[in-house]
């Protein structure tokens, strides 16, 4: 059975009815994902027979997470773990702690993980988890109790061969260490491979912390070459100064680019000559926010989206580049560090305006790629050096980018649709090979 591309088919747009567990009038980010899948259907050839698989998460678990607060009260949080697709291997995807987490969001993030893992060809399906909580309101002890109780609750569906978690917004190495320990205590054996993004001393991988930002930078270099954009004189704007945004900003600055604008949850900053990133990151580490940094001009939230740049890196949350903002952006290249930052209608506007978008499912796949390396190292208990990891990361990212670039050129579609074509075909091909049971 060949995976060669087949002719483009005409397919009428589907009307999406929300599944019973989502609000009737709002599909949210899951609706955004469904629209992206619809754009791929005409390119699936005989595999379109299986396409409904992509529109239905394999498994959804909603859990109540009760903990005792430091003041003696009992608080309840709602948590989720969604396994979107496991045809190509175990579910894989991060855990998010955020006050606006919804089931629709976790479903979409899980689906984007299926697409991403297939697009870069790591042997995983897609999954994601989250708890609706503002972790900044919790003490360290409360955060640990909540993480451990959540891990225990989702313990019935996770495991190193079933579903592997990783850090996402507001979760980090320490949270992965607590998740790994809780799972291990419950099964009676240290099981490092149940999470990735762990501390290096606990089976984590060198290079994992920087991997997503490094991947953004790697595809940024390739896309810039295609555009004839010289990185050493490029102006870069970054939304999100966390794990992804800060590392990407630093690597672009090291290549000579000027990071002229940044935005995080606390505010936006501008400096035409380029921000002093070292000083900014030190300020952000001290205050937990970029706001108040004195060596820059403060901008309004909307002002950030109007700054002239060559490269824009959204690296915070989804739904940031809306149609309205897409009309005002003054940039040439968008590298999606975040998952789902651009709405489908904004995508169309950006294509019309000739602004190139390297989609999340390729641009931020560096994290899961090194997570895969971490998982492999955990199984063999043999650890590679950082140069080896970065070399392999750059190779995987470059090959994935070039393959997607070729499909986009051949089919005259956006890089996002091209990445979805590559990924959906891989996923549905494994579905076809495995068949339905019984
Ligand atoms: P993080 O928690 O380390 O950082 C998030 C950043 O976003 C912070 O600087 C925060 O201030 C900012 N932010 C939050 N709300 C904002 C708002 N309303 N407006 C502007 N900025 C806001 O998270 P991260 O791990 O860097 O993840 C960022 C994005 O990258 C997410 O979409 C995540 O899913 C995606 N991602 C992360 C990884 C990874 O390895 N960490 C991998 C792939 C994709």
Image (tube, rainbow, N blue to C red):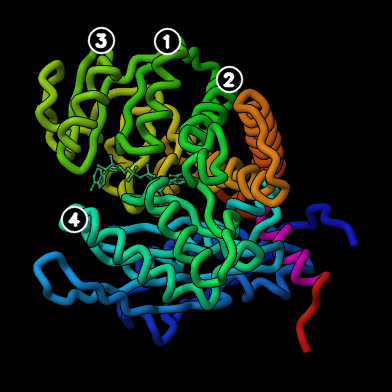
Classified by dominant secondary structure, the portion drawn in magenta counts as helix
Q: Mark 1 or mark 4, which has the lower sequence index?
A: 4
Residue tagged by mark 1?
256
- Tell me residue 350's x, y (percent): 42, 41
Q: How far is the residue under mark 3 from the one under mark 1?
A: 12 Å
Q: Mark 3 or mark 1, which has the lower sequence index?
A: 1
The mark tally for this picture is 4
Q: How far is the residue under mark 3 from the one under mark 2?
A: 23 Å
Say few, some or many: other residues with alpha carbon within 10 Å of mark 2 (under 14 / 14 to 19 / 20 or more).
few
The residues colored magenta run 422-432
Residue tagged by mark 3?
273
User: Is 361 in front, or is 352?
Assistant: 361
- Tell me residue 328's x, y (percent): 27, 37
User: Is 35 in front, or is 28?
Assistant: 28
Residue 139, label in figure: 4
Residue at (36, 28) in percent of width and height = 331
Q: Is residue 23 left or right of residue 5?
A: left
Question: Is 142 drawn above or below residue 286 in the view shown?
Answer: below
Assess whether mark 4 and mark 2 are in contact (beta carbons under 8 angstroms): no
Q: Is mark 1 within 8 Å of ligand 1?
A: no
Q: Mark 1 or mark 2, which has the lower sequence index?
A: 2
Give the foreground label among 3 and 2: 3
Residue at (63, 50) in percent of width and height = 375
Residue 225, label in figure: 2
Q: How far is the residue under mark 2 from the one under mark 4?
A: 47 Å
Classify the position of the N terminus by image quarter: bottom right
Say few, some or many: other residues with alpha carbon within 10 Å of mark 1 (under 14 / 14 to 19 / 20 or more).
some
Q: Mark 3 or mark 2, which has the lower sequence index?
A: 2
Question: Is 365 drawn above or below residue 22 in the view shown?
Answer: above
User: Ligand 1 lies in which image quarter?
Assistant: top left
């Amino acid at each position: 059975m060949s995976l060669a591309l087949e002719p483009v088919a005409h397919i009428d747009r589907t009307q999406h009815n929300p599944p019973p567990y989502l609000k009737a009038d709002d599909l949210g980010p899951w609706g955004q994902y469904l629209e992206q899948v619809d754009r791929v259907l005409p390119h699936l050839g005989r595999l379109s027979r299986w396409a409904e698989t992509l529109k239905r998460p394999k498994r959804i678990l909603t859990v109540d997470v009760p903990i005792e607060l430091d003041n003696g009260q009992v608080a309840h949080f709602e948590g989720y773990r969604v396994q979107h697709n496991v045809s190509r291997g175990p579910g894989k995807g991060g855990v998010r702690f955020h006050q606006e987490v919804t089931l629709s969001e976790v479903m979409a993030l899980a689906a984007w993980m299926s697409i991403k893992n297939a697009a870069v060809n790591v042997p995983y399906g897609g999954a994601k988890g989250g708890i609706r909580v503002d972790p900044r309101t919790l003490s360290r002890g409360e955060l640990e109790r909540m993480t451990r109780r959540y891990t225990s609750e989702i313990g019935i569906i996770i495991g190193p061969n079933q579903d592997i978690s990783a850090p996402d917004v507001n979760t980090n190495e320490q949270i992965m260490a607590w998740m790994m320990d809780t799972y291990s205590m419950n099964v009676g054996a240290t099981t490092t491979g149940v999470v990735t993004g762990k501390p290096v001393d606990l089976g984590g991988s060198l290079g994992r912390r920087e991997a997503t930002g490094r991947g953004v930078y790697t595809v940024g270099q390739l896309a810039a070459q295609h555009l004839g954009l010289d990185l050493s004189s490029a102006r870069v704007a970054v939304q999100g100064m966390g794990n992804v945004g800060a590392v990407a900003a630093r690597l672009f600055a090291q290549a000579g680019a000027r990071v002229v604008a940044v935005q995080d949850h606390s505010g936006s900053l501008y400096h035409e000559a380029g921000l002093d990133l070292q000083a900014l990151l030190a300020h952000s580490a001290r205050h937990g926010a970029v706001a108040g940094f004195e060596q820059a001009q403060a901008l309004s939230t909307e002002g950030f989206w109007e700054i002239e740049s060559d490269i824009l890196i959204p690296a915070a949350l989804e739904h940031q580049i809306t149609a309205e903002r897409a009309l005002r952006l003054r940039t040439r290249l968008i590298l999606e560090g975040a998952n789902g930052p651009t709405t489908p209608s904004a995508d169309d506007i950006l294509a019309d305006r000739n602004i190139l978008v390297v989609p999340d499912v390729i641009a931020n796949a560096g994290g899961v790629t090194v997570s895969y390396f971490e998982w492999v190292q955990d199984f063999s208990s043999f650890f590679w050096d950082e140069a080896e990891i970065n070399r392999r990361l750059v190779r995987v990212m470059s090959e994935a980018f070039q393959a997607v670039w070729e499909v986009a050129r051949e089919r005259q579609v956006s890089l996002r649709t091209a990445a979805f074509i590559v990924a959906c075909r891989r996923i549905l091909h494994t579905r076809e090979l495995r068949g339905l049971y019984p």
